[in-house]
Amino acid sequence: MSQLKYHSQYIESRNRIIENTRIKRTDYREILNNHLQVIYGYKLLQPSDINSLSGVNFLLSSSRGGSSITVDILKQQAQSVSSVGKRILFLPGEQRPYFELAKLTPPFKKILSDRLDKSFINKEQVGYFLSELTSEIGYPVSQTTDLKGFAIAIYGRLLLQWPNINFGDPDNAIRTIELAIEKVSCVIDNTLIYKDEVVSREKLMNYIKLYFSKIDLRFYDSINSKIDTSSTVSFSQYGFFIEEPPFIIPSPWHFASINDLSTGILILKDPSDAWRIPFWKWIFNRIPLSYTHLTRNVYESINGLCEGWNFPYGYITTRSPQPIQIKGYTSIELPWTSWYVNYSTSDKVWKLLLSHQEVYLEKIVVQQWIDAHQSIINQVGNDLNYFRLSSNKYEDKIGFEWLRSEPIEAISQLCNIFEFELTSTLLKAAQQIAIHQVQVTPGTNGESNRWEKAPNRNMIALYANDPVVVDLSKKLGYSTK
């Protein structure tokens, strides 16, 4: 791809916001580190600690490939693992904020796509990236009495979600958030306990908005469909996000210790990793790596991506240096559709987008699907620690469809592959999938074969039956219609 040509005013504005957020995040990590030492007796992880990890597994897929729901289930394992079991570690949200703050995304990176290797990076960027990444490693807990620690973590997350909002003095902001947490906590044995439940999260964010009125709840996962969406959105009010919406509502989080690293395995999940594998191999050059390739039926993948592109308050990923024209997307009356590209992107996708011609949304998303899976196969398909999970051969493979239909057996097989302990909370999470008590990805519904009911189903079928798509589907273990 050629050198980017962003407007200088946009570059200056974005650089200013990133630099200000870096300062605030550095202060936040210092506050968090002091709290961990006083309350728990250990320090927040530093970049130099990363090599203590016993292993890293990458859950690789195309966008809307089922990785989020897989991780949501696996996140339940760590809090009930036995003393001898291998604990699964995670990040509390997506990886993108770390890349944004390290200036490893456009307009600071030389190319628009998510492709990344060490040639794009300098020493300062690596240092800052690792300071963000390592400080977030851990796992969620279902409830907490450490309301201040939870408030500190929420404050750190709000800095990524709303970089243009002035939250004021950090200590005052954290105390204000703690007051909101107290309002939705319950008293057990004379102790305030916050229980991490959907209702609690929604109430918590509504209380936080009372204190910080500029927060727009429409951009939050699970809240946006339940609030008034009639008022207009002024995109200039937000500038740009560092965390990609729809935003997570933070759960109580156990920040990992050195001992947690040495006895656990970190699972990283981001569809953009399909093009970042060389970068990660360089970053984790002393750590054993493995790769889990999660696949999904191409018809459902295309439909899911189209739904996501058209979801009004989410998946706003990369700003284009020039207006884009996508039939079935840019006709939506929202301030950012002519400028922002959704989901993970390859060089080929950007070539289509910048062709100065209107292109069908289905063509864009099928290219996203093709390039992600082909990149994964090309880069790690022959690695001894590569596992492909699809839905046709149940004896050794699982995937999105099987996770929906046979979640307990699917999760059990995942645990067998990686020698994870199949804990009680993990089984409970799988059972909730089995009885459909699980939140679907914003912008979608939980119905199976919903592509057949989509208004653009003929276009979906047209692109799904392209010879290149059919050939790749067969390689991934899917039969064609």
Image: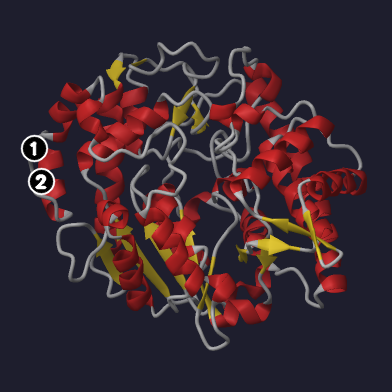
In the shown orientation, is residue 100 left or right of residue 291? right
**Residue 297 appears at what percent x and percent y?**
21, 45
Q: Which residue is denoted by mark 2 in the rendering?
A: 471
Pick the residue in front: 159 or 399: 399
Instruction: Check disc 2 and give the amino acid type.
Output: Asp
Whether tag 1 and tag 2 are in contact, CB under 8 A, the answer is yes
Dot 1: within a 10 Å radius of its alpha carbon, few (fewer than 14), some, or many (20 or more) residues?
Answer: few
- Circle 1: element type: helix
Specify the amino acid type for callout 1.
Pro
Residue furthest toward the front? 189
- Asked whether residue 389 appears in the rendered view, the answer is yes
For disc 2, the neighbor class at 10 Å (few under 14, some 14 to 19, many from 20) is some
Q: Which residue lies furthest to the bottom in this view?
A: 84
Q: Please tell me which residue is depicted at 25% across the width and 19% down the height of the picture.
A: 455
The N terminus lies in quadrant: top left
Q: What residue is shown with label 1? A: 467
Residue at the (80%, 69%) spot, across then down: 36
Marks 1 and 2, how far apart at CA: 6 Å
Residue 315, image x, y percentages = 49, 33
